[in-house]
Amino acid sequence: MKHLLPAPLISLLLFIIWPMLNASLSAGHLLLAALLALGIPLCTERLRPGHARLRRFDLALRLVLVVLVDIVLSGVQVARQILGPESAIRPRFVWLPLTLRDPHAIVALAGIVTLTPGTLSAAISDDRCWLLIHAFNVDDEAALVADIQRRYEAPLREIFE
């Protein structure tokens, strides 16, 4: 069974997301969803750097809630800044030092940063010690780094490492 479904969670998500994206539960879309759910994980198995191991599932759920709240609050804040004077916006690239070593944790952090309105993960250093972030408005670079480390990186370290 492991050879047919090397990543069962990814397969399940693909099977659920495909009909949602097409807004159709027709037999054709369900068949295509099943083919994608089986085929994509098989074709990409060698690209995955091992399997993620969640050490603290309860903390992962709390982090999801924190991220969802932050997405909403950041969206409101970005909207206010866009509607305000343009001279008040100070975009900047910021290098975030990483203490994470697990590749899944690093990808999760980059994804969280990108999902949160006003920030975008731009690059990771070759040694995986720095994450380059573009922020829409930065008053205090050190405060931004500290906030990301406290709110996202610290829980991810406990979850994955």
Image (cartoon, helix red, strand yellow):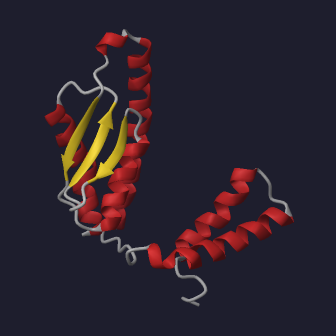
Residue 73, x across and y down, in percent:
40, 31
Residue 42 visible within the image: yes
Name which residue lies at 42% across and 18% down: 82
Residue 66 visible within the image: no
Picture quadrant where residue 52 is located: bottom left
In-front residue for pair 85/150:
85
Quarter of the image that includes the C terminus = bottom left
Residue 32, x across and y down, in percent:
76, 67
Q: Residue furthest right?
A: 27
- Is residue 13 placed above or below 112 in the rendered structure? below
Name which residue lies at 25% across and 53% down: 153
- Is residue 73 placed above or below 89 in the rendered structure? below
Q: Residue furthest left?
A: 142
Please tell me how many numbered marks the rendered image carries. 0
Instruction: Please give left or right for residue 70 compared with residue 126 in the image.
Output: right
Residue 33, x across and y down, in percent:
72, 66
Residue 46, x across and y down, in percent:
46, 79
Quarter of the image that includes the N terminus = bottom right
Name which residue lies at 79% across and 70% down: 31
Name which residue lies at 66% across and 62% down: 16
